[in-house]
Amino acid sequence: MDSGAGGAAVHAGVDFQQRLVAYFATAMLSEVDVSPMLAVSEPLLIERISMETADSVDDFSLDCHGERRVLVQAKSSPVLSSNPGSEFAAAVNQFVNQFYDDRGTNNLYVLAVGPNASARITQQLRKLLLAIRYDSNAWKRAPLTNVEKDVLNIFSQLVQSFSQERGGCELTDHELIRFAQRVHVATFDMDDSGSDCRTAYILLRVLTRLKSPADLVWSRLVQLCLDASKRRLQIGKDGLRSSLSRFIEDAHEKYEAQSFFEIAQTGSVEAGKEIVLLSFDETKILIAELHRFDGQGKPRVKFANNKCTLQSGEYVLLHRTSTIVGMERYLVKHSQSYADRQVVLMPAVFDADPNLSNAAKARAAWVREKLDQLRDKLSCLNCGKSVSARIATVIEVDDQDHSPDAGIVHEHCVQPMHRVLGEIVSKFAEDNPHLIDFDIKLWVQKLRTGQGLLTGLRGSQNASGARIVWNPDLVETNRRYCIRILLSDGSRPAILRREKVHQFSLSEAKEKVTEFERHLADGLRIGNPLFMSADGRIFGDRSSLAKMYPEESVSECKSAEVVLFSRQIAEEFDRWENYYAPLITIRVGESEELFKIGNAIVFLSDVFQVEKHFLNWAAAGIILPDYYLEIIEDDAAFDIVMKNNLSTGLLAVIDPFLAPDGTVMNGQLVMPIAAAIEASKQN
Ligand SMILES: [Zn+2]
């Protein structure tokens, strides 16, 4: 390798490390739990990032809530090697040293690697470490493959030799296991199109509320993290926020109160009065202002069945607010509905301000607390869907038909008995009017472990225009059993489907195993045994697998067995949580049917391309009627949508861009497998 290429490789490594620090910094600012990313089971909220060494960023720690500390060694493409000078050995050395310093703590050690790290690290070592966390006898008990034995040997020998250097003696077996139980391997795809980089972008865009382009903030953040590491500084939330303040200036000032919505307008909750709009008769509506509580703090007005009972009788309730101003706002907005009726105002004269009574103050405090708890839970109290419209209505529930509550509802979901406290305006929604009622946190959460198929396509050359095959017979089943294949090298991969451990019922699994063993026997009889790749993804004869995999990662299938499915097996073999999902669908009009272009239902895969698509479709003459966006959270939901629609002869397309004449120019067509086979015959 000439020095130029070597320099590029070093640069790529440094770039990975910087980006990883920036990624964690983003998660810290956004208060996102990073435990799923680090393959750790208990929640980890980062409070500070500390740089350990002056001249590189490959060594940092995440100081998390509850005194948890995670030491990270970041290596973009390490190779598992027993050479003490290798990158891998350097990381193990750091961990061993830390282990000596960490007696009495429960600190964790994470080897964070890029997608190009050797499979011996991302697969075999990861698997061995996972097994030992579940069962401290795993290495003795489980049958290990030759590759696994080799990996375990190299790892143990490195640990022991560094222990000898540091502590003057080797670790006991017990100590070695305790050490290994702290070590995690986690893979991060920090390329521009990588899933983790995309997640960071989304978080930044929400955080900055689109004040600045996310890539600009991202590069600034990467630079800040590099500076901090050079000077061995700690990166804390407050410092980082103020360094980025010119990008997130609005959010910065009232950060503590920052959430998707600013509930600022409800700052003073008024709880002492009832302002009610009543239907008096065909010609008149009545506005009454009433004391809410009596001297004993009991409600004076009864609300039930959308009616309001006063001393003078029972009336049909049209609207209910906490202030006169709120009622006026309602009437202005709905003046058309009441244009032919006379408004009769019944103002009250109060001896003292009803809002200052003890009962009112107690109730106001209770409501205030309820609203403070909302923060991220922005679903409508009425319909349950996410609320991210520009304006949402803050209400209190207090009637005889429902248990008391307070929260937000869609403007169109306000019910007559809802006691309207005010309106809130979302800055984010104001800046992103196309993201109607979109649950951005759910999206980010699902994206990290989803879109396995699309992520694979993004990395490939001819992604656009690709056809995606969907098999209607493979709808999600979550049964209790799975099948493991015993290979000649001693490994036991599980059978996957959509890159996830396939779960069967016991009878299905038994049937499959019988079928599989018959297939094996047939292969042996004709001298063409069945082989499988070590990652469990592909079966075939030796020669066809040899084209795709190096020889060492292909083995002969010996037998198959039915085993109980477990979380451990899933963690070991699942590549993605979801293969297709998350995706976005658009529901239109009063019927809320799925939006289609031609005879294809439309899915979108990137929340920040939504507007671009809308503009493109508009240019082709397709204007969306009233709509909202819906998240297809997981593959099970995707299968349901596909089944319901494709059975009626419709097609599906992901991310369509249209030519001006309305034909699909770009996008990924999703076809049922039968149609795909038919189409390939015709070509
Ligand atoms: Zn609603």
Image: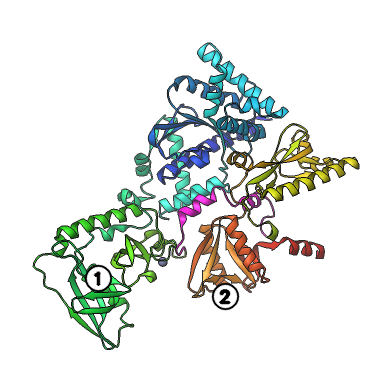
Q: What numbered label is drawn on residue 621?
A: 2
Provide the secondary structure element on which disc 1 rests.
Answer: strand
Q: Residue at x 61, y 51 (%)?
A: 478
Q: Is residue 595 above or below residue 59?
A: below
Q: Residues within 10 Å of mark 1 (few under 14, many from 20)?
A: some
Which residue is most to the left?
Answer: 351
Image quadrant containing the N terminus: top right
First in sequence: mark 1 or mark 2?
1
Visible residue check, residue 84 = no
**Closer to the camera in the image, 650 or 190:** 650
Q: Is 307 covered by the magenta stretch?
A: no
Residue 575 placement (x, y as % from top left): 62, 44
In the image, which residues are magenta? 435-464
- Image-based side of 475 in relation to 524, left or right: left
Provide the secondary structure element on which disc 2 rests.
Answer: loop
Q: Residues within 10 Å of mark 2 (few under 14, many from 20)?
A: few
Which residue is disc 1 drawn over? 302
